[in-house]
Image (cartoon, grey):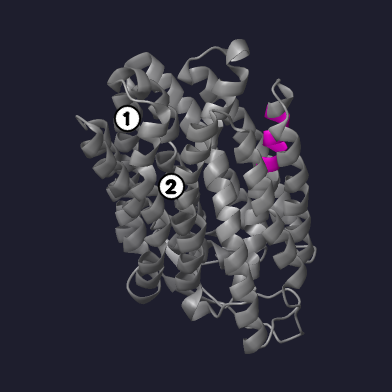
Amino acid sequence: MSRATNRPTILFLNVGHTFAHLFMLIFPTAVLALEGAWGMGYAELLPLGFAGYLLFGLGSLPAGWLGDRWSSGWMMALFFIGTGLSSILTGLASGPVGLAIGLTLIGIFASIYHPVGIAWLVAASDRPGQVLGINGVYGAAGVGGAALLTGLLADGFGWRAAFILPGLVCVAVGGGFVLSLLSGRIAMARAEYQKRDGGVGAAAARRGLFLLFVSILFAGLIFQMSSVGMPKIFQDRLGSIIGEGAAAAGLLVSIVYAISALGQVGGGLLADRFDERWLYACSYGLQILLFALAAATFNPALVALIAVAVSLQTGTQPVENLLIAKYTPDSWRATVYGLKFVLALGLSAIGVPLLALIYGSTGAFTGVFLVMAGFAVVPVLVGLMLPGRVPEPLQEPVIEPAE
């Protein structure tokens, strides 16, 4: 079976990326409806999701290790079914404690996707940047679709439906994945990453990974604060124009992430052609300017500024994933991606209470934008410091059935 033509595998992995982000971002929009239903404030409700956001990242390390050492196929099955059931449980919560437990379980099961799925995709094509870029479009659909879908379901049927109905769909897709796995339609390409222009020595690779991990933490803080805060940002700054309902804010978030899908494809294509280090530094350099402008913007131009910033963030993801692949041997690929997402989605979850703290103490988002601009300085410096590559022979890939 050709690496590039294993369509059922790639389709399931792409849909999984949508689900991973969708379920993690139902709560930030549902919380707008919960404010009225439970009589609790935004700054009081938002921290209930902290453990889930933290474990969404921290769980990536054991998930990646199990994907390398046990079974990538069955880990993905666990992702689909576990995430769906956890979302249904969250929708049945009767109070803040039950809600926090459900959100935590969503984070645990959703943490499986990134280390296992991304490691699988890197070897899926001779143009990994393009494949990762398309996969990123599916992820952006989950991020943006979560806000719109949640807003519509919450306004139309109540906040519980926003968790229960997507959960049922995820479980159903998980059942289809299991059947495909058992029938042999799903296959994994376990291959040494095909370095376009060579690799680096062991010492340089370790230095490159260390620098990337530092950058990933700060980039993750930016992602957490922007994605979780976005519905409230639009409601707070544009409420006089769009109204106070969750659906209107959710629609704007969906527009932002629909635009950002172009960044995913563009970033992947550029990563196949140009030096990833410079792409990485330039992306975050532009974000510094955009966040500074957003801090002072209180009109519809804010949507455009945030859309461009998010497009740069998402477009950098395939670049970052290819840099990690260049510095990592195949046998540890999922594990190292697990380490990445421990930082990008786990430790960076402190961005959620930080967001609540800044907004709660100031009642505005100006400080949030300025803090994100400061965080973006670190990836710029890292991109300029990453080690270069030296020529080395390419290795032939080996195709294995999914475990």
Name the one closer to the observer, 285 or 365: 365
Q: Residue at x 49, y 45 (%)?
A: 354
- 333 or 123: which is nearer to us? 333
The x and y percentages for residue 345 are: 47, 54
From this viewpoint, is residue 303 visible? yes
Q: Identify the image quadrant of residue 271.
A: bottom right
Q: Amino acid at mark 1?
A: Leu
Relative height, residue 197 to residue 88 (above, below): below
Between the C-alphas of marks 2 and 1, the distance is: 15 Å
Q: Is residue 308 magenta?
A: yes
The image shows residue 4 at horizontal and vertical percentages of 59, 61
Q: Evaluate whether residue 26 shows in this view.
A: no
- Disc number at residue 188? none
Secondary structure beneath dot 1 equals helix
Task: Using residue 386 as the reference point, say whether residue 32 is left or right of it.
Answer: left
Circle 1 residue: 165
Whether the magenta-drawn stretch holds residue 64 is answered as: no
What residue is pinned by disc 2? Answer: 20
| Crowd class of label 1 (few under 14; some 14 to 19; many from 20; radius 10 Å) | some
Report the label total: 2
* Local secondary structure at mark 2: helix
Q: Which amino acid lies under the numbered mark 2 shown in the image of this protein?
A: Ala
Q: Which residue: 62% across, 12% down?
A: 241
Q: Residue at x 55, y 51 (%)?
A: 221
In the current view of this chain or complex, which residue is farthest to the left? 94
Q: Which residues are magenta?
A: 303-310
Q: Are marks 2 and 1 in contact (CB under 8 Å)?
A: no
Q: Which is nearer the eye, 123 or 371?
A: 371
